[in-house]
Image: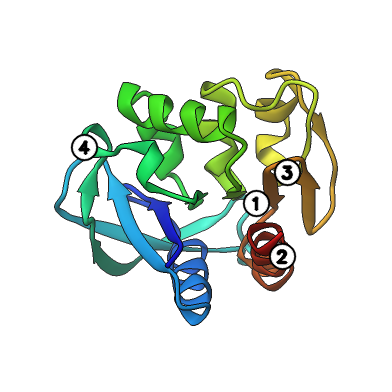
Amino acid sequence: MKKFLLVIGDAAEVLDTYYPLFRLQEEGWRVDIAAPAARTYHLVLHDRHPEWDITVESAGYKMRADIAFADIDPDDYDGMVISGGRAPEYIRYDADLIRVTQAMFAAKKPIASVCHGIEILAAADCLTGREATTVAKCKYDCEFSGGTYVDREVVVSGNLVTARTWHDNPAWMREYVKLVKG
């Protein structure tokens, strides 16, 4: 059975998290929720409202992490999915998350990232020479890290599959599953 990491932290986006969790489980694959510590995290909902110029954030579901970043052996996993929301802004400073991301990238294991998840790919130096997409406000994270930003619902570049926001989840997971299956 294939085994994947799903990276979260407090303020990970609900749909960026649950959609890939359920999609990978539908394939019969195991998904371990990974975070800074094995504890319960608070997810959030992100939406745009006509009277706001920025994203509105509301409390969402809670999710328990199965494994702490420090306890992960990248060799035990077939790939990873990086959730979006505001969590990546904070957890990208976790040295163990960067270690795991770099190891998976170097081993050419499939890595999926949506929305702010690109901040982790940037911190792990996984974007140089790659095309990627992300929420528009993270375009510079891609470009300043040596990547080429493309405004499309999903971009596949080698072992990276990136998407803009939860609105792109079907295309994002369709391409990720296709990449995993080879």
Residue lying furthest bottom in this view? 26
Indicate left or right for 123 with 171 as reference. Answer: left
Whole-angstrom CA distance, mark 3 to mark 2, is 25 Å
Q: Earlier in the sequence, mark 1 or mark 3?
A: 1
Q: Nearer the viewer, mark 2 or mark 1?
A: 2
**Disc on res. 71:** 4
Mark 4 is on which residue type?
Asp
Indicate left or right for 76 with 157 as reference. Answer: left
Residue 111 visible in the displayed image: yes
To which residue does mark 3 refer? 136
Q: Residue at x 51, y 35 (%)?
A: 104
Disc 3 on helix, strand or loop? Answer: helix
Q: Earlier in the sequence, mark 4 or mark 3?
A: 4
Residue 50 visible in the displayed image: no
To which residue does mark 2 refer? 178
Q: Residue at x 69, y 27 (%)?
A: 127
Q: Residue at x 44, y 69 (%)?
A: 21
- Dot 2: few (<14), some (14–19), or many (≥20) neighbours within 10 Å? few
To which residue does mark 1 refer? 53
Whole-angstrom CA distance, mark 4 to mark 1, is 40 Å
Disc 1 on helix, strand or loop? Answer: loop
